[in-house]
Amino acid sequence: QVQLVESGGGLVQPGGSLRLSCAASGSGFSISVMGWYRQAPGKQRELVAAISSGGATDYGDSVKGRFTISRDNAKNTVYLQMNSLKPEDTAVYFCKSFIPGIPSHAYWGQGTQVTVSS
């Protein structure tokens, strides 16, 4: 069993920055793919960024060049640095942990609200 706890969300002005953290408990963090997803009201959940166990990264088109995902396996934590925030980045941000090829190992955090507004 894995538990994921997100933190770092809040209210920020357009152009500002936030750093989200996702702390994982349980086994398998170092071999898990970690992802950040977001869901705005009335919209589907979408991939923001993901990082493999080896450090390879992938980003949604709307955040490329502005957001950076990273992980610290010693701390069982994944981060999302968000710069140049826009109002359209407003959403609940969720952390996900999964191991490719092991469908039973897929976990979500409870989410953290990010609001970009002046």
Image (cartoon, rainbow, N blue to C red):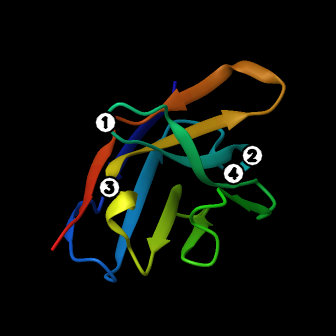
In front of the other: 8 or 61: 61
How far across and down, in percent of the image, does residue 95 sit?
A: 48, 44
Mark 4 surroundings within 10 Å by alpha-carbon count, few (fewer than 14), some (14 through 19), many (20 or more): some
Q: How far apart are marks 1 and 4 (CA)?
A: 33 Å
Q: How far apart are marks 1 and 3 (CA)?
A: 9 Å
In front of the other: 7 or 46: 46
Three-letter code for the amino acid on which mark 1 is drawn: Pro
Mark 3 surroundings within 10 Å by alpha-carbon count, few (fewer than 14), some (14 through 19), many (20 or more): many
- The residue to which callout 4 is attached is 30
Three-letter code for the amino acid on which mark 2 is drawn: Ile
How far across and down, in percent of the image, does residue 96 sit?
A: 54, 39
Q: Distance between the residues labelled 2 and 3?
A: 30 Å
Residue at 54% of width from left, 77% of height from top?
Answer: 66
- The residue to which callout 3 is attached is 90
Residue at 34% of width from left, 83% of height from top?
Answer: 15
Three-letter code for the amino acid on which mark 4 is drawn: Ser
Residue at 38% of width from left, 73% of height from top?
Answer: 85
- Dot 2: element: helix
- Dot 4: element: helix
The quarter of the displayed image where residue 86 is located: bottom left
Whether 79 is drawn above or below 49: the answer is below
- Dot 1: element: loop
Whether 11 is drawn above or below 25: the answer is below
> Which label sits in the foreground, 4 or 3?
3
> Which label sits in the foreground, 2 or 3?
3
Residue at 38% of width from left, 63% of height from top?
Answer: 20
Q: How far apart are marks 2 and 1 (CA)?
A: 32 Å
- The residue to which callout 2 is attached is 31
Q: Residue furthest top?
A: 104
Q: Residue 41 carries which label?
A: 1
